[in-house]
Amino acid sequence: MISNFKDINQLKFGAILSYANILLSIGVGLLLTPYIIKSLGDSEYGLYTLIGSFVAYLSLMDLGLNYTVVRFVAKYRAEKDNDGERNFLNTAMFIYIIISVVLVLIGIGLYFNLNVIFSESLTTEQLADAKIMYLILLFNLAITLPGNTFTAICNGYEHFIFPRTISVLRYVLRTFTVYAVIKFGGKAIALVLIDTFFNLFLISSSFLYTRIKLKVVVNFRRASLKEMKQIFSYSSWIFISTIVFSFQWRAGQIVLGINLNTVVVAIYAVGIMLGSYYTTFASAINSIIVPKATQMVVANSNGSQLTKMMIKVGRLNNYLMLLVLSGFFLFGSEFIKLWLGDNYEDSWMVALLIMVVYTIPMTQTFGNAIIEARNKIAFRAIWDITSMVIAVIIGFFASKNYGIIGMISSLVVAKAINVIAINFYFMYIFKFEILHFFKKTYLLQLIVVGGLSYVFFILKGYVSVSSWERLMLSIVLYTLLYALLSYKFIFTIEEKNMIKKNVLNRS
């Protein structure tokens, strides 16, 4: 009984802390980014994001092992197989050590070619700073990959509270440290050192927790060839999916850094950051709903019932997605101008395009869970990575003439084609009733939200949103009307009853 109570607390407070991490990352990003840009300047901030994105590609060598550790640790614990768990962790750590060594060697090779890669876009002084930041970030990456194992072990043991508490603490301490360091004249190199220090703090804390509290001892010298085969058979497609997710947006920063300059990279990076907030918040909601939906699919998986469940999940997600999307369409440009200045106006278009192209996939997360549950992820991963490589190549040449718009347009078109392809996959492989899904999930919502957005768009022609006060008042008014119209005209009886049960009854 006590054990069950502790498990419930771990899940409950772990979920709360997960949301706290998301809200902190968004809040800190929105508050700290303009301060950093103003203090460093557009050019140096662009250099900071450029080198960070460049090194981030090396982090893709994680090979999906972090998710694999969580999954197999939980599996061995459920089976009470202590020997299997120990052999697995020893093997996983051995693989991580090998990956870190390989990354350092590759990173050193790239270090000696930074002059060639960025010869046309960076000045001599910028190249010197870039090399220092690159080496620091390379060290950071080399310790972070194996260090992530300890956080994954905590998750596998269903000890969610400690790692998430440490993560929240890191966000808070890092924010105050960055503010203080920049206030006293710190530059981009100082930010990289701060991030490295707090990564060490997170890794060492997780290591001590797994060693002292969980009594887990990892010895990478006792690796098992059998375990290696099992690990890679599971993690390979996760690795490919991770590559696609990172490749499709971060590639633009590298391309723009090569073809143009760091100021353009900074503008593009802000758009990517805002677009990623949209998908991150939606993912947090899906993580709560999708597991239960997946269990229902295992029990009963004909096409009509799968469609019904995807509609149920999709409609709930779509209320939030369309609110954010339509609100950002109406007020996003003014927000960015007030937040960062007129120079960052193009960031609005970058973020808006990402939000538009991700809205359908985020409302179809249930369908993606079906693909993974039935081990059909290969088609999606191969299709995604092929189309994105082609898109980056096209974007490379398009950005020379059309800048940011040329780059983001090629990536967004590729993603849109992927969405269409996946919907045909749902229809013909899993027998989803896709047209019925779009009718029930989107038709009425788009009519109501489109009408409300049109009214506010017309009103903006008469009332200028040129101050924070007017902007916040407009957003609050729009949100209230959106909620009232949705409840009145869009919500089903079941959805209204759910709101009454979970919100009104508690008050």
Image (cartoon, helix red, strand yellow):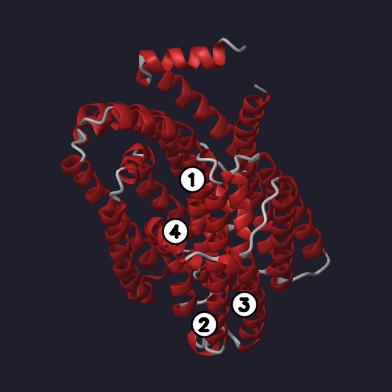
Dots 3, 4 in contact, CB < 8 A: no
CA separation in Å, label 1 and label 3 = 29 Å
Nearer to us in this view, 297 or 90: 90
Residue type at numbered disc 2: Ser
* Mark 4, residue position: 231
Look at 19% across and 45% down and name the residue there: 424
Compared to 41, does 367 lie above or below? above
Residue type at numbered disc 3: Tyr
Q: Could you tell me which secondary element the residue under label 1 belongs to?
A: helix
Look at 65% across and 76% down and name the residue there: 133
Dot placed on the residue nearer the N-terminal end, 2 or 4: 2
CA separation in Å, label 2 and label 3 = 16 Å
* Quadrant holding the C terminus: top right
Q: Could you tell me which secondary element the residue under label 3 belongs to?
A: helix
Q: Is residue 162 in view?
A: yes
* Mark 2, residue position: 121
Compared to 221, does 35 lie above or below? above
CA separation in Å, label 4 and label 1 = 32 Å
* Mark 3, residue position: 134
Dots 1, 3 in contact, CB < 8 A: no
Dot placed on the residue nearer the N-terminal end, 4 or 1: 4
* Mark 1, residue position: 278
CA separation in Å, label 2 and label 1 = 31 Å
